[in-house]
Image: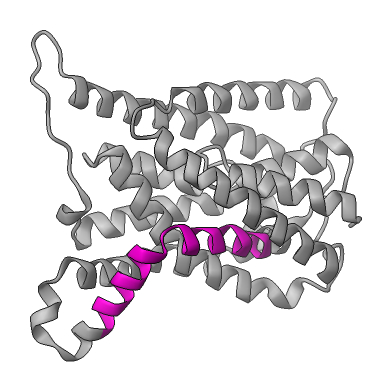
């Protein structure tokens, strides 16, 4: 991997990690369109550490408060009813599905799941799911001639059942094209949570999963196509760009619809299908064992 490739891929990672359009799919597609070798699942996992560092800094007050309350609840029974302490447990519970499924399907994630036809399918299908979820949320928030405005749930109403559902939604993002934020936000909206609550828990839930995945994949950084220097460079680029994107996205979702992302996903999926069907791109274009 050249330094220019790592710069472009780090930029793509930072731009797409927090948007509901799938960073892993865009890294895969960038390599395929440019004629580069697929950076691979290891490169993706490690550069995600950069974007998760952005989450740690952006949500630092929330994280410090939650971690502090969780540790105190281990020895102080009265703290166990505290919302922040409960959030600590819910992040742990919600992280179980992706941990188990990530280890179980590791070979598929690094191989068959990176087929461009599968990526096109997940882009379209999950785009439609996000569109439906967004429409239901808008209907509750705006009401109508024959419908009263319906109050949506906040994170204070999050329980173990919903936490696990969020977790299984996040696990869907093991397949490129699904999108971690897209899947968890869609799940949250379908369960009746506000856009802000769904997005906030989505980002908090991603922290242990992404950091664990990145550390687990560190051993592969020096093997094959992925090398230490360019990978670390891309990770720093992803961090800087990712922080700017998350700050913008959290403001965007308070007043705007997800429909621009829905349209983009569906159109990209259709274009990708057309390119593969006409032979412009091979379903395995640029693949590597990186």
Q: Which residue is drawn at 85% across and 50% down?
A: 5
Q: Name the residue furthest top.
A: 145
The spot of residue 283 in percent (x, y) is 77, 37
Nearest the viewer among 222 and 12 is 12
Give the prevailing secondary structure in the magenta stretch.
helix
Quarter of the image where the C terminus is located: bottom right
Nearest the viewer among 120 and 18 is 18
Locate residue 153: give its quadrant: top left
* In this view, 99 is above or below 239: below
Nearest the viewer among 286 and 61 is 61
Nearest the viewer among 208 and 247 is 247
Locate residue 116: give its quadrant: top right
The spot of residue 174 in percent (x, y) is 54, 54
The spot of residue 39 in percent (x, y) is 78, 55
12 within the magenta span: no
Locate residue 36: give its quadrant: top right
Q: Which residue is drawn at 27% across and 37% down?
A: 190
Residue range corresponding to the magenta coloring: 45-71
């Amino acid at each position: 991997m050249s330094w220019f490739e790592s710069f472009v891929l780090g930029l793509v990672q930072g731009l797409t990690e927090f948007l509901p359009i799938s960073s892993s799919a865009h890294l895969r597609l960038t390599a395929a369109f440019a004629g580069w070798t697929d950076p691979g699942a290891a490169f993706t996992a490690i550069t995600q550490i950069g974007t998760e560092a952005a989450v740690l800094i952006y949500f630092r007050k929330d994280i410090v408060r939650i971690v502090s309350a969780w540790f105190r609840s281990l020895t102080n029974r009265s703290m166990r009813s505290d919302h922040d302490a409960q959030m600590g447990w819910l992040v742990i519970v919600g992280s179980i599905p992706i941990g188990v499924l990530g280890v179980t399907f590791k070979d598929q994630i690094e191989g068959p799941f990176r087929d461009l036809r599968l990526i096109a399918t997940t882009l379209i299908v999950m785009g439609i799911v996000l569109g439906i979820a967004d429409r239901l949320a808008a209907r509750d928030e705006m009401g109508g001639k024959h419908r009263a405005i319906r109050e949506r749930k906040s994170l204070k109403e999050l329980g173990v059942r919903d936490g696990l559902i969020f977790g299984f939604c996040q696990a869907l993002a093991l397949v490129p094209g699904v999108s971690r934020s897209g899947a968890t936000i869609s799940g949250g909206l379908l369960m009746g949570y506000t856009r802000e609550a769904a997005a906030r828990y989505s980002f908090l839930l991603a922290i242990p999963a992404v950091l664990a995945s990145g550390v687990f994949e560190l051993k592969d950084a020096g093997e094959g196509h992925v090398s230490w220097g360019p990978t670390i460079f891309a990770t720093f680029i992803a961090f800087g760009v990712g922080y700017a994107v998350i700050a913008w996205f959290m403001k965007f979702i308070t007043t705007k619809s997800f429909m621009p992302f829905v349209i983009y996903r569906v159109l990209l999926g259709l274009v990708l299908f057309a390119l593969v069907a006409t032979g412009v791109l091979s379903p395995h274009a640029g693949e590597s064992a990186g």
